[in-house]
Image (cartoon, rainbow, N blue to C red):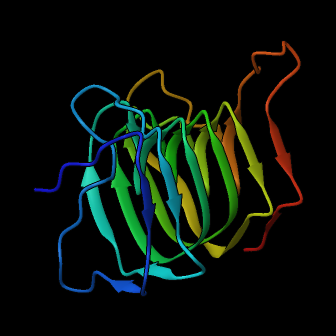
């Protein structure tokens, strides 16, 4: 099991293919722990990630208060009953810049907020793209509506400036 120091700098030096391997989210625990460092994908790709879990916030990064940039995530398959889930970040309070996603997110149970780049955006998403796949909520618990589904973000929350958080210069193609 890897231990991620939240305030450090991480950079990919090559593509990573998880085919046939198990993967755990970065910055994930029983309670939400925010990644607060910088993750530089350097234009590389993380592919063939398959993850299944339940709880409150889930994605390749469970939650982020840091900076994630220049990363491609392809063929991710995420199955979750988490309330909030995203292909790259479950809950974003930081900056996501120059990131692309292609994959499948299937939420069940309590899953109500699902997005390709981030399930919930409380920060800034800029120059990002969802390059296709599927995002859907199925077999939800009684009373869960699952109506916050989006190609970039499932939900955008009000920002600390009282106006909102931002998604700038992004695209989503299905």
Residue 102's x, y, as percent?
A: 58, 75
Between 125 and 79, the one nearer to me in the picture = 125
The image shows residue 107, relative to residue 21, as above or below, that is above
Residue located 45% across and 49% down the image: 138
- Residue 142 visible in rendering: yes
Residue 103's x, y, as percent?
A: 51, 73
Q: How many marks?
A: 0
Residue 159's x, y, as percent?
A: 76, 21
Q: Quadrant of residue 82?
A: top left
Q: Is residue 37 left or right of residue 114?
A: left
Q: Is residue 142 left or right of residue 156?
A: left
Between 122 and 37, the one nearer to me in the picture = 37
Give the quarter of the figure containing the N terminus.
bottom left
Q: Is residue 169 left or right of residue 37?
A: right
The image shows residue 153, relative to residue 18, as above or below, that is above
Name the outermost residue toward the left: 1
Residue located 80% across and 63% down the image: 127
Residue located 67% across and 30% down the image: 122
Q: Is residue 2 left or right of residue 48?
A: left
Name the outermost residue toward the top: 162
Residue 15's x, y, as percent?
A: 42, 86
């Amino acid at each position: 099991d890897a231990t991620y120091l939240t305030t450090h700098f991480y950079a990919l030096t090559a593509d990573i293919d998880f085919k046939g391997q198990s993967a755990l989210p970065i910055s994930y625990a029983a309670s939400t722990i925010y990644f607060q460092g910088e993750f530089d994908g350097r234009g590389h790709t993380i592919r063939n990630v398959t993850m299944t879990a339940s709880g409150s916030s889930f994605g390749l990064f469970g939650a982020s208060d840091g900076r994630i940039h220049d990363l491609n995530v392809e063929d991710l398959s995420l199955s979750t009953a988490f309330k909030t889930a995203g292909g790259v970040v479950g809950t974003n309070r930081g900056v996501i810049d120059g990131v692309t996603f292609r994959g499948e997110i299937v939420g069940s149970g309590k899953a109500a907020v699902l997005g390709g780049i981030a399930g919930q955006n409380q920060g800034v998403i800029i120059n990002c793209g969802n390059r296709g796949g599927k995002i859907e909520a199925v077999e939800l618990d009684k009373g869960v509506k699952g109506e916050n589904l989006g190609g970039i973000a499932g939900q955008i929350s009000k920002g600390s400036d009282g106006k909102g958080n931002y998604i700038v210069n992004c695209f989503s193609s299905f």
